[in-house]
Image (tube, coloured by chain):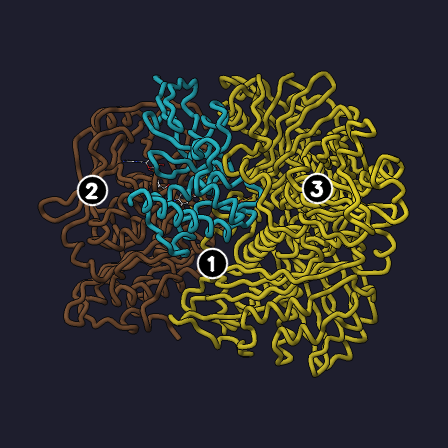
Amino acid sequence: MNLFEYVRPSSIAEAVAAAGEPGSAYLGAGTNLLDLMKGGVTRPSRLVDLTHLPDLNGIETLPDGSARIGALVKNSALAHDPDFAKRFPVVAEALLAGASAQLRNAATVGGNLMQRTRCSYFNDPASACNKREPGTGCDALGGENRSHAVLGWSDHCIAVHPSDFCVPLAALGAIVEIAGAGGQREVPLTDFHRLPGDTPDRETVLEAGEMIVAVRLPADAAAFADHQRYLKVRERTSYAFALASAAAALKIENGTIVEARLALGGVATKPWRAKAAEALLAGAAPGKQVFEKAAEAAFAEARPSGDNGYKIELGKRVVARVLAMAAAGTPDRMPALPASPFAPIPEGVVNV
Amino acid sequence: MNLSLTLTINGKRREIVLDDPRVTLLDLLRERLDLTGSKKGCDRGQCGACTILVHGQRINSCLALAISYDGASITTIEGLADGDALHPVQQAFIDHDGFQCGFCTPGQIMSAVGLIAEAQAGEDAERVREAMSGNICRCGAYKGITEAVLDAQAKISAGKERDAA
Amino acid sequence: MSEIASLPTGSRQRQGSNIGQPMTRREGVLKVTGQATYAADNNPEGLLYAVVATATIARGRVTHLDVEAAKAHPGVVEVLTPQNRPPLALDPDAKLHGFMFRLDLLQNDGVRYAGQPIALVVARTLEAANEGAALLAPQYEVEAPRVDLDGENFVPEVVGPGAPARAETGDFDAEYAGSAKTLEATYETPPQYHNAMEPHSIVAAWDGDRLSIDMPTQGMAMAIDRVAGLFGIPAENIHIRSPFLGGGFGSKGMPAGPQMLGIIAAKHVGAPVKLVLSRQQMYGPVGHRGQTRQTLRLGMSDDGRLTAIEHHTLASTSRFDDFVEPASNASHTLYAAPGIRTTHEGARIDIGTPMFMRAPGEASGSAALEGAIDEAAFAARMDPLDFRLLNYAEVEPISGKPFSSKALRECYAKGAERFGWAKRPLEPRSMRDAEGRLVGWGVGTAMFPAIMFQAAARAVIRADGSGLMETGAHDMGQGAWTALHQIAADGLGLSMDETEFRAGSSDLPDAGIAGGSGHTATAGMALHRAGEDVIAKLTELAVNDENSPLYGAGNVGVVARNGRLVRQDDESRGEPYAAILQRAGLAEIEGKGQGVPDAGPREKYAMDAHGAVFAEVTVDPDLGQIRVTRLIGAFAAGRVINPRMVESQYYGGMIWGISFALHEEAVHDKRSGRIMNANLAEYRVPVNADVPSLETILVHEDDPYVNALGIKGVGEIGVTGTVGAIAGAIWHATGVRVRRFPINVADLLEGAAAR
Ligand SMILES: Cc1cc2nc3c(=O)[nH]c(=O)nc-3n(C[C@H](O)[C@H](O)[C@H](O)COP(=O)(O)OP(=O)(O)OC[C@H]3O[C@@H](n4cnc5c(N)ncnc54)[C@H](O)[C@@H]3O)c2cc1C
Ligand code: SF4
Ligand code: FES
Ligand code: FES
């Protein structure tokens, strides 16, 4: 790890000013940033420590019914907040399906949104990587890419966005509140992360010095509380990133899906909202067939970026399953194995 | 750059002046404060051997920048026993053979103490396994670990009930 | 109550109170309080930190290192490269015997695998040393590497540490040609890395030409020998302390190159140096389990009797040294057939040299063999357990030798009963759990040879009647501090608390190697013999002393029990050890013992531990994710010294089996040769949630031949059999036969699609 200047601002304004300098990076809990610095993947010359800032630690319900989560709220604190978890159970389930208890106790909401890809070439400074060093090429193309993206990739980058948390946020239409030198602005989460295109190094819409101050879940997102689930397939039962995951939220009235929300994780270069699938579901009666159709729609544009064609099939099955689980209803209690295929499955959901 | 910080480690307040901003909590404990009970298995948040409690919550000390934790109250494996009297989790790990080589053990035990305080798992072994999955044991002592956590948790809550009565 | 029959009347079956007891670990309190000191926990005064810089290419030459930049970094004290590395007394590429492996000690600018040390940075802090190493920014002349098995191969002279590469009994070709049914299957196993939780580390300090080392090692004496040779100092000038290893699994059997670099650094800078490998650096210079491609050809009669077994292994080794995974040899012992042939080939590729890794040969070999046996059973329309019983080896198939003991039938029976195996339907894909997931059951046979090395021990009885036993044994988690202490106490006829037990330091008698599952047997036998020796000497004193109640009892024999010597024919007549020594005016009396394999019985008998593992897996039929929901292993491994520790060894081994079957695999980028998942997040090993249910059954077995204590070994056998059981269960659940490990989600999705 390189030497750096450590700055501890006492206000958002100070933070933004300090981080405006080139080479600066914000420090949340550091569970991703320090990891990258130890690996020589990033070498910031200044760390601006956000963790001592006041007022970014709250989970509040705003007068309009939306929920506002401060950027420094710990992943575990959010997942275990009883009121929040009741209104947005899919968010809690996704959070608890990510990383480990220790990491969730440290990791911040802002840091989670900003975490970098697990692409092994990105994480290996000896490899060519357009994301790490623009213009050097992409060693994942033609390399070990079984875990890479099938949606949203470009010839410049095929890396997956690794966050679980962001998947339900995308589905539920979360808003990211941003502070910068010019004041505050907000962006829908689905617009917050960028597609790689030919600038995979630019991962979000944040400009130099801008920071996340909060994430908001709009009031209407709570209307899905009775029917929402997260499902995550991974190569071990816990403490592993997703091969494919999906968050589904349904508003069901009188046996009809009035509105559907669906987003994908582990398969795309950013948290992936599946709007075409949502449209297909709206107005339909919940059922295997329509769920499978929705799954097809969600992956209609998917194509392998290497040895990862299996992810398309897997992703479809995850979608069909998570929709069926959501339709069956949010469980009263978080399953022992959150978001795992080995958590209890509602009857009739498994294909026989 | 002001690199001085105050930590309360195992109940003792310590003023620390760092000569380097890069020091992690784990390296601070191990290499500068001679508290070598916390172990480094990966240094990258992938194994849990470095687990300590910060304000009672378990975290990976290898991915925690020491200077950022100014003001924190920390418990390490060295601070768990009360003199010669082992913490119930420590005793349970011995009783259930919840370790072999012992290298992951300080992290497992701190993680278990954190888990019991979180009170999320109850008596459900499956919840305990999931909640302890951030601590890798290459020796494969998981069965004993899970039994030890359940046993210690039962003893701790029995103790609390007794105290309340 | 402890008892030992003394010489000269010869040893008697002992009824010691310590052996066989499920005692908790003697070092338990140290380990749960953080006070057990592993090598890297030592911080001597004036300590400097060394960090190795490793190659990012797999083949070629280092053309430039930015030594200036590294040296300019605040805190960096010195940079060692091939240019300034002090000379060694022995070429690190010298290979004087089969157990000597070539090391990378900055002898030249060549790179022969990714992860090879190419320089060393010494600094006042760990942070500075790490950054110094990064600042070296090596440049290379790169050659195209080869990291897989496709390409040119060779036939090795020996496999493993020295077994013949080919073995045969009967006429395989004729038997195979004449078989009613034949089956051919190719299985692949990936490169695997030991990944002990404790990374290889060393704290080295020189004092003139004396060297003090804290270093985890599974072979203290071999390590001393290696260090003495490399540095040209007498063995007695070297002191290694290795009280605790944070796991070894074979990778700490031989001192690793980077650890030797720590010694070089300490010498060069004239201060104590700590060197600890990063997790990433554990993938290269400290050994691994080489990848294999194994082809099994089985012939059988119509009724499912095996007639021919051929097991061919192609295994990787490095370009510069030899260790070919002896995987085919798993077929020497397990199943009877008139024609058996085992062969090996090696592939020289650009990797660090593979080495012993928990159940070397047996793990990979039995994974493939058990898979093929499972396939053969189904081809014969037989239950896989019945098939194994039908082909049960009454004598060791390859040699025709009888087994010194073999309670495998009982293992099968007890395991099957506990598991409920009788209810297993023959057809795959015929069981579901309550929620509709696929369920499958599989079985595998476990086997591991009862190996012994050589060890020595010293026994002392002191004037106060207490005892001391010493042997430089190694506890890497298997429980040596406890099990050997139990044997030691019984050897002296004392309780554990009356017996001081010392181990883990090189100034004690050589305890041999903690490997091959042979440490308890070997070091245990040394302790046992040392106990006999000291008791015999004590007896000698007593029976010749007119003032002793045992005077003249030499002919009837004397028994040591509870700190007393008593007459064998009249146990009321005797006296405490202390009385004998005090009368003789001795402060203590000393005995010595050796633990060595008994050549006679070993010629006559095949000696192996056996077991049967039963696995239940649950597979999500849509998503392909797998979980081993139940694993039961029944093992017969001779005398059990401490059932608690033995069970833990089996559990650990079985979890390694889960890992082999479902998780671990090092993935090389074929172009660069680098391992792309050299960490613990993407190189997956099981986590707690992967192990919902584990059971072991300790099947009683008396073995009169293996050694006087009747001990076989328990450390490695758990891996074997388990892999095959899980793979068989996955097939039984899904109908998809995956012949490549680890079996993963994509395999089952693709398999399901192809089905
Ligand atoms: C072994 C391991 C396994 C993991 N498994 C999973 C998993 O399964 N699922 C999953 O979703 N995640 C997983 N994670 C990732 C984990 O969730 C992230 O590391 C964590 O959320 C990052 O939060 P942090 O506060 O530590 O961020 P930091 O490390 O402090 O910061 C991460 C990035 O965000 C920037 N940043 C931080 N806060 C702000 C802010 N307020 N505004 C702007 N920029 C900011 C930083 O500059 C940095 O670039 C895993 C991590 C590890 C190490
Ligand atoms: S996929 Fe993206 S992150 Fe990975 S190597 Fe290519 S450019 Fe870099
Ligand atoms: S050392 Fe911190 S998680 Fe491994
Ligand atoms: S006890 Fe050895 S790693 Fe857990």
Ligand 1 occupies quarter: top left
Report the residue marked by disc 2.
A59
- As rendered, which of C272 and B51 lies closer to the eye? B51
Q: Chain of mark 1?
A: C
**Disc 2 and disc 1: Cα gap in Å?**
35 Å
Q: Of the residues shown, which amino acid type is indicated by label 2? A: Ile
What is the secondary structure assignment of the residue under circle 1? loop
Colour chain B is painted in: cyan
What is the secondary structure assignment of the residue under circle 3? loop
What is the secondary structure assignment of the residue under circle 2? strand
In percent of the image, x 60 and y 67: which residue is there?
Answer: C415
In percent of the image, x 82 and y 60: which residue is there?
Answer: C605
The chain painted yellow is: C
Mark 3 crowd level (few <14, some 14–19, many ≥20, 10 Å Cα): many
Colour chain A is painted in: brown
- As rendered, which of C83 and B157 lies closer to the eye? B157
**Disc 3 and disc 1: Cα gap in Å?**
40 Å
Report the residue marked by disc 1.
C692
Q: Chain of mark 2?
A: A
Report the residue marked by disc 3.
C494
